[in-house]
Image (cartoon, coloured by chain):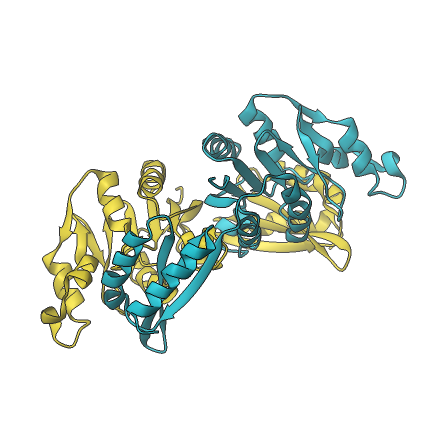
Chain colours: A yellow, B cyan
């Protein structure tokens, strides 16, 4: 069995400009790993319709799931829902179920739904809604594309609701062995171990700390025994 | 004058797995904004040759610059330099200038250059070297693709050396106005201002804090007067 794959698209001028440090990608990456879905690619694109549509179409055909974050609020720069509709070539409009859910966020219900607020009930035809317990305005899934808000607390609650609906893969087991040697002294023995454990992902992540080089060797597989066996070999190779 | 554009490619299994939170992208985004280069897209890809080659070829033809981070050490999973050579269809081998620079990192100079260490002197034909004052092993630029290490301290020192060699754009001026209103009450007046200041990027970044909705309105342009004028309009619209 192979785990499902996924891409994430962050719609984020504020991240590209360096104003904000990403939080949603880091959060999703951890959650997907727990759920047994392999996050294989992330793209951060600007609030430009053409770029968003291209990113959606290039990823949705390649991966089992695509998760997007950002651009589904009511302001002029919120164009994600329209871009998704355009990527799929389907129409989008205010939808009754989304409108009624949105109304629960306001004191006077539907009477408070101004034209601006109604923008948050625009849902592409055939999409199913993603729950938002914080501010009600729903996200949506269409085929394998899941569209969520950019505000981290809302993004996180949408993921919390969505993930249990998606098929679980086998949980990725991982272990880290810290080796206090420069990578040039690690490479040969580690390369041999990587060849021996061909179905295990073995990565070397160098660091530089207090003027000394070292590396974290990360061993990952859905098979716990393989991870443990490879760890034993790594520890043996470096007398740990 | 339009500012140069850029993409960044992070080669990072450890970021996709959620093990590590990205630091290099956040750092580069800020530095490029200061330098007047517009970071337009970021891709985070896994340590798979085909994915790295595709990402390089799709971005290098679209943007003025491509910056990569990660995968240029001496271990089996360090395949970035080979992928860059393959993307350009050129050969790669240990190069004398890189070999001599690398040797300065070791007590006995070139005599200490084992086969493994020499992997870090493999440079695609025609590339120019990027200085690494920390651990000597150089990065390189080939045409508009700049290849750097993943270790944050090394990545940062390479950027420090590289950026002054690249044409500066006009510095992006930005200002942020915090509006303590839900976006649905911000959208109409802000949309009108965005239409009025068509050459200014005006984004609304909602937040949710202490059970209250608000948004940071970010106004960006290389023209300081436009930014100030737009800020006055935003403050007027929301009585700030």
Which corner quadrant of the image does residue B194 belong to? bottom left
Question: Is residue B138 visible to the viewer in this orientation of the structure?
Answer: yes
For the C terminus of chain B, the quadrant is: bottom left
At 61% from the left and 39% from the top, the residue drawn is B166
Residue A194 spot, x, y in % from top left = 62, 39
The number of numbered discs placed on residues in the rendered structure image is 0
Q: Which residue lies furthest to the top in this view?
A: B90
Q: In this view, does B202 lie above or below A57?
A: below
Q: Is residue A68 left or right of residue A33?
A: left
At 26% from the left and 69% from the top, the residue drawn is A135
Front-most of residues B144 and B57: B144
Residue A146 spot, x, y in % from top left = 29, 51
Q: Is residue A238 left or right of residue A11?
A: right
Q: Is residue B28 left or right of residue A74?
A: right
Which corner quadrant of the image does residue B184 belong to? bottom left
Q: Residue furthest right?
A: B108
Question: Is residue A25 visible to the viewer in this orientation of the structure?
Answer: no
Front-most of residues B32 and A70: B32
Q: Is residue B100 above or below residue B175?
A: above
Q: In this view, does A100 lie above or below B73?
A: below
Front-most of residues B32 and A185: B32
Q: Is residue A3 above or below residue B220?
A: above
Residue B190 spot, x, y in % from top left = 28, 61
Front-most of residues A88 and A113: A113
Residue A45 spot, x, y in % from top left = 40, 46
At 82% from the left and 43% from the top, the residue drawn is B105
């Amino acid at each position: 069995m192979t785990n499902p794959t996924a891409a994430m698209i962050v719609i984020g001028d504020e991240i590209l400009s360096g104003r904000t440090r990403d939080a949603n990608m880091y959060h999703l990456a951890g959650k997907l790993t727990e759920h047994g879905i392999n996050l294989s690619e992330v793209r951060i694109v600007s609030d430009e319709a053409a770029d968003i549509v291209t990113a959606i179409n290039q990823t949705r055909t390649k991966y089992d799931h695509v998760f997007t974050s950002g651009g589904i609020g009511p302001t002029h720069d919120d164009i994600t829902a329209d871009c998704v509709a355009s990527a799929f070539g389907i129409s989008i409009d205010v939808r009754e179920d989304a409108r009624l859910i949105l109304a629960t966020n306001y004191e006077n219900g539907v009477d408070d739904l101004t034209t601006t607020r109604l923008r948050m009930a625009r849902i592409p035809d055939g999409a199913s809604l993603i729950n938002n317990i914080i501010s009600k305005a729903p996200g949506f899934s269409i085929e394998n594309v899941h569209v969520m808000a950019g505000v981290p607390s809302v993004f996180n609650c949408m993921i919390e609701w969505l993930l249990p609906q998606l098929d679980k893969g086998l949980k990725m087991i991982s272990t880290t062995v810290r080796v206090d040697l420069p990578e040039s002294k690690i490479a040969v023995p580690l390369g041999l171990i990587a060849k021996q454990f061909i179905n295990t992902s073995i990565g070397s992540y160098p660091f530089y700390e207090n003027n000394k080089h070292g590396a974290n060797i990360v061993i990952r597989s859905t098979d716990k025994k393989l991870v443990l066996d490879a760890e034993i070999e790594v520890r043996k190779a470096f007398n740990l």
